[in-house]
Each structure stands twice: as structure tokens, then as C-alpha cells.
Amino acid sequence: MATNESHTALAPGSLSADISRLVVRLFAEYTGRGPTKARTTIRDDTIICVTQDTLTKAERRLTAEGETDLVVTIRRKFQSTMREDLVGGVELLTGRKVLSFMSDHDGEADYAAEVFVLDGPPIVEAAIDDGAAPAG
């Protein structure tokens, strides 16, 4: 898994990276294969996690055979099924309540987006060291 995180003023890289890892892990648990790339951006009370290369071999084959709408329908079902775990994980990581969760998938380009609107900016623990992003 290659994860590219955005850095925020609140938690330089660490919170973004944690959310990216959460999303990738849950996709893998639910579909059998996680995205190869994930990037999370945090701005005020909004979190957006964009993933790339999430489709399974079977889903890629269906898309190649013109069944993109079917693949997107199935992916949307997975995303709604994962909703509770995604929202719970983001609430745990941010210390905030998720007021709104939106999710979608582009089957042809194989990008997905998970959007979380919080009840305020993430609460960051004082344990973050001098602002240096973790190596990785």
C-alpha cells in the first residue's frame, strides 16, 4: 500500500495518515483488496479521503466489458455497508462527531472519495511531537 498524506496545521501528517490507513484497511476488510493509494485532506471541520486503484480483478474485468454501472452500484453498497466503521473510526481518531458522511466511486477512473463533515475541527492530542511528520 502506498499512502500519500496531506499535512494539516493541526496534526502534521499524522492524523491524515491515520485516516488514510483506516480507509484503506476497511476497504481491504470489506472487499478483499484495499486501494494502493490514499490521500486525506483536512480543512477545518471537513475531511476528504481520496483513494485510487481500489477495484478487484473481477471488478476491473466487468468494467472493461462495459459493466461500469454495475461495478459502481456494488461499490456504493460496500461503501454504505462500511459507513458505521468509517464514521466510528474517524470519530475516534478526530475526537469529533461526524455530522455527515458521503461516499462515492468512479468506476472508470477507479477513484473513490470518502467525505466526513465533523462538528468542529479535529481535536489533536498534546502528544504530537515538535510538528515533524512521521517518516514513512
Image: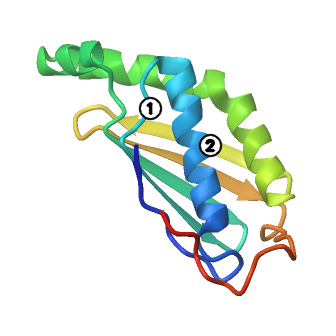
The front one of 17 and 108 is 17
Q: Amino acid at mark 2?
A: Leu
| 72 and 35: which is toward the camera | 35
Q: Nearer the viewer, residue 59 or 15?
A: 15
Residue name at image x 44 percent, y 23 percent: 75
Q: Is residue 7 left or right of residue 73?
A: right
Q: Would you say residue 7 is visible in this rendering?
A: yes
At a point 50% along the width and 69% down the height, the residue shown is 6
Mark 1: which amino acid? Answer: Gly
| Residue 88 falls in image quadrant | top right
Q: Which mark is residue 123?
A: none
Reply above or below: 58 against 36: above
Apparent side of residue 10 relative to residue 36 in the rendered image (left or right)? right
Are the residues at dot 1 and dot 2 in contact (C-beta closer than 8 Å)? no
Which numbered disc flags the more N-terminal residue, 1 or 2?
Answer: 2
Count of numbered labels shown in the rendering: 2
Residue 56 horizontal/vertical position (percent) = 32, 21
Find disc 2 in the rendering and name its residue. Answer: 22
Q: Position of residue 128 (x, y in %)?
A: 77, 75
Res 77 visible: no
Could you say which quadrant of the image residue 111 lies in? top left
Taking the spot 55% from the left edge, 75% from the top edge, the residue there is 7
Left/right placement of residue 10 relative to residue 109 reads right
- The residue under label 1 is 34
Label 1 packing within 10 angstroms: few (<14), some (14-19), many (20+): many
**Residue 132 image point, x, y percent:** 61, 82
Q: Quadrant of the N terminus?
A: top left
Measure the alpha-carbon separation of dots 1 and 2: 10 Å
Q: How busy is the neighbourhood of tag 2: few (under 14 within 10 Å), some, or many (20 plus)?
A: some
Q: Depth check: 86 or 128 in front?
A: 128
Mark 1, secondary structure of its residue: loop
